[in-house]
Image: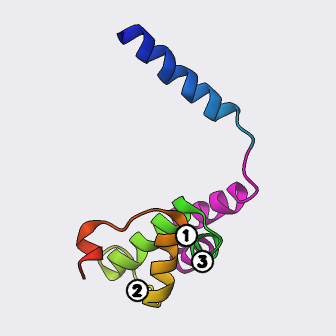
Amino acid sequence: MTKLLLVLTLSSGLLMAAAPARPDDSRHHEAFAQYEVGHYQEAFAAFARLADEGHCEAARIARQMVRHGTKLYPTSFQVEPERLARWERATDCPLPRDVAAR
């Protein structure tokens, strides 16, 4: 049973690695590169655009940036509640419970 699980896990990883890149992947990587060098406003704008298009990971990152704001970044990120809700609904990426309870 353990061997079967390992084979399935490895097979899944190989399949994911062999999958063609989505058109928005390069924009996501560029947004992440902006984030890594501390260009948070530019990164947030890029993540937000992708989130508006339904990119789940970008929506998750953008929501976390909104959530943590000045605790982690030298700025805060303002987003309308309706837009945050759209990101959650469109991407099927639920907000963490403590954010959803606010």
Describe residue 70's horizontal placement relative to residue 42 as left or right: left
Mark-to-mark CA distance, 1 and 2: 24 Å
Q: Earlier in the sequence, mark 1 or mark 2?
A: 2
Mark-to-mark CA distance, 1 and 3: 22 Å
Query: Which residue is found at the position 47% from the left and 66% from the top?
Result: 61
Secondary structure under the numbered disc 3 in the rendered image: helix
Describe residue 36's horizontal placement relative to residue 25 as left or right: left
Q: Position of residue 55 (x, y in %)?
A: 60, 63
Q: Position of residue 70 (x, y in %)?
A: 33, 82
What residue is shown with label 3? 42
What residue is shown with label 2? 76
**Is 21 rendered above or below residue 81?**
above
Q: Which residues are magenta?
A: 21-47
* Residue 79 visible in rendering: no
Depth check, mark 1 against mark 3: the one in front is 1
Secondary structure under the numbered disc 1 in the rendered image: helix
Q: Earlier in the sequence, mark 1 or mark 3?
A: 3
Q: Earlier in the sequence, mark 3 or mark 2?
A: 3
